[in-house]
Image: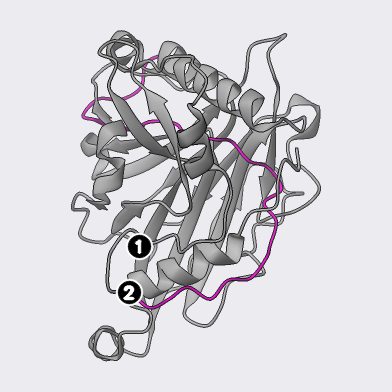
Amino acid sequence: MRRRELLKTLAALPFATAVGACDEKDENRRGKHTNTVEVHLDGAFALVIQKNKGNSLLAFSPRPKSGDEQHLFCFNGSRKPEAEGGKALQFKLSPEGLGREKKPPEINPGLNDFFFQTEKWRVGDSLVTIELPPADKITFIGHRSPVTFKADGRHVWMPGNHVLKYELHGAAAKLECSDGSVKCAPSPDSYLGVTRFFFEIGPARTLNYAASHAHAISFFNYILHQSFPDLEQKYSLALESPTSAMHEQSAPYLAPAVLQYGTQPAHLQRASYILDCEVAGPLVGTSTAPTG
């Protein structure tokens, strides 16, 4: 479960820098009462953009099959997993002050290889589901892992998370949970002007790199099979061992988690992710309601 020490603060600071936290002109333009909300979906979450519902979002993580590597869910970096005993959890982020324009989100080009479209999908039996209002931006942070599409042999790099960004104007984000025992307060590492929520899904056991990579690819394919059957044949990933060169590039290391050039150097601090999955789930656009 605690597979390796990663850089949660590395994830936060360069991202905040990249989106303009240090841009004084942008801050003045947004005004004193603007608050940024970040929702971090770390690991095996599918994220659906529901065009038929004003571009609102639904994130979910299907429950693994019996006998397969099981998952745990942690909230805001807690060392005590939530949803123990197989209990499913449903979260909802209040739309008040969020996504008023309901326009499509700005999506980081680094997610393009895993941004699919379908009109046939289902949620099914999921460990966690999260209802979210339309986001201003969908991006990612941290390292990416090498993967290969089975159908055409195309080699790509896949992020391990999705980060949703919202701008609030004079309003506060409110998160609710179906289980009243789950404290839905913002993450302790929120800071002035930025409210953050972390949702983490990953294997219950500690896995080495090879086992974790294989599990993540298998589970990505399982998400397609269970929830997006029209996408399975074209977008399933090949179960293969990364080359030593790819492994070296994708192994954990201290480096800025920002793709754009010309940004400020990252200020690195050590912090631990409780759970980790090598790759995220798919990002899917749809114009239809889920079935089943």
Distance (Cα) linking label 1 and label 2: 27 Å
The residue mark sitting in front, 1 or 2, is 2
List the residue tagged with mark 1. 98
Residue 37 in percent (x, y) is at 44, 66
Residue 172 in percent (x, y) is at 47, 72
Q: Which residues are magenta?
A: 263-292
> Residue 273: within the magenta?
yes
Residue toward you, 41 or 243: 243
Residue pictured at 70% horizontal, 9% vertical: 66
Residue pictured at 30% horizontal, 38% vertical: 49
Up-down: is 166 above or below 154?
below
Q: Is residue 147 left or right of 255 when viewed as pictured?
A: left
Residue toward you, 79 or 141: 141
Q: Secondary structure at mark 2?
A: loop
Q: Which mark is residue 213?
A: none
> Residue 265: within the magenta?
yes
State whether residue 139 appears in this view.
Answer: yes
Up-down: is 144 above or below 266?
above
Residue 176 in percent (x, y) is at 58, 52
State whether residue 280 appears in this view.
Answer: no
**Extreme residue in the front direction:** 245
Q: Secondary structure at mark 1?
A: loop
Residue toward you, 270 or 76: 270
List the residue tagged with mark 2. 263
Residue 164 in percent (x, y) is at 40, 54
Residue pictured at 70% horizontal, 46% vertical: 4
Callout 2, which amino acid? Thr
How many numbered circles are shown? 2
| Figure quadrant of the C terminus | top left
